[in-house]
Amino acid sequence: MLVCALVLTRATPTHAHAVGVSRGSYAADGSDVRSDIVLARGELIASLPGLDRDRDGTLSAKDIADGRALLSDWAAHGVRVGVPGGPCVGTLEGAELTEQDGVELHLVHRCPERAQTFAVELALLADLSLGHRHLAAAIAAAGSVQAVLYEAHPTLDLATASPAAPSDAASGPSQARDGRAGPKPPQTAAGPFAARLGAVAGELATVARPLFRLGVEHILTGYDHLLFLLALVLVGGPLQSLLGVVTAFTVAHSITLAIAALGLWTPPAAIVEPAIAGSIVYVGLENFVVRDIGRRWRLTFLFGLLHGFGFAGALREIELPARQLPLALASFNVGVETGQLAVLAVVLPVVTWLGGRAWFARRGVHAANAAISAAGLWWLVTRIALP
């Protein structure tokens, strides 16, 4: 009951599944450095509440247009670019909503000399969600680099970073926004195999690792998903049946995570989020009457499909390049499953131990189920009332 009370105070109905990831492309263009940065709308609203003037929890094209000055000031202070000759002066060239649930910012920094190499510092990471990861790709005459930036490590310097393999640059800003080809990275002398090996290593470092970590963080801070898992195992029963229920949930949310992240089909969040809350209410109430959990995996599979759509927002909103999406999807899903297994490794022994105590079997399990149902009902009502 204490756990349920804590998650109720931490979770908010609006933007129930925080994204925690963004991406950016930074390209030298003569004495300019052009940047394209994609952020989730929910995180932008949290950082700049003044953008959402009607307070409806969403951003429209009109909100972006009306808040141009606010965005320009935030971006100019939050994205700092410098060359060896000194700092560059940044301006916001444009901002637009993406097809998914993101916002893309287009910036240009005028530098005091030709940007043969440059450094980028993202001070705006301090304004974003805790643990936010920024997937950055930068290119100049000196080479191309991909890196993962976060609040404690907000700087990318082309002059000191290890250059990426040539094929890595394909996902970066190889063209300026005016369509002219950007500088090509230097060819390696080690041959195509070494170049390909370097490309794979670069993909693992800049895509797989941060997305794996994001998946772990996403499930550990996804209080509704964790509460649903707790409800599934709280009734106890044979280990084989419990594993069947958890496996059905895992397989189901992996399917819909892939469907949504690949852009095949995505139901509206206004439907998915209340439905996830409703699944918690249902399982919590069903725990009062369920006797045989051997067939429960079927219903759990259906609910798992809903939860998968909830997970998918973390990849969908930043619109990763198509070439990186399969690796990002696999890494994120493995991270989610790793976090889920870590939680179950702690919860299952505790539930098993409590199940052997008469006081818990008589009163404790019913109190816990009531608290779970109450938490789910709270989320259901607030997510409908405040979409």
Image (tube, rainbow, N blue to C red):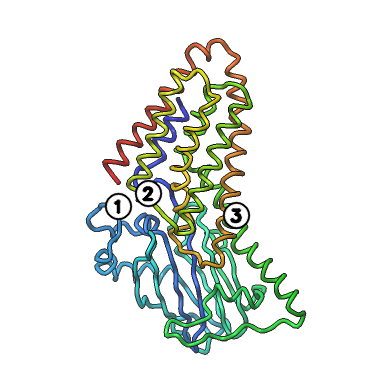
Residue 299: image x %, image y %?
47, 32
Q: Mark 1 points at which residue?
A: 57
Q: What element carries label 1?
A: loop
Residue type, label 1: Gly
Q: Mark 3 points at which residue?
A: 331
Residue 385 figure quarter: top left
Residue type, label 2: His
Q: What element carries label 3?
A: helix
Pick the front one: 16 or 80: 16
**Given the current orientation, which residue lies at the most extreme right position?**
190
Q: Mark 2 points at which residue?
A: 15
Determine whether 376 is above or below 253 in the image.
Answer: above
Determine whether 206 is above or below 172 in the image.
Answer: above
Task: Give the mark toward the camera: 3 or 2.
Answer: 3
Give whichever of discs 3 and 2 has the lower sequence position.
2
Q: Is mark 2 on a helix, strand or loop?
A: loop
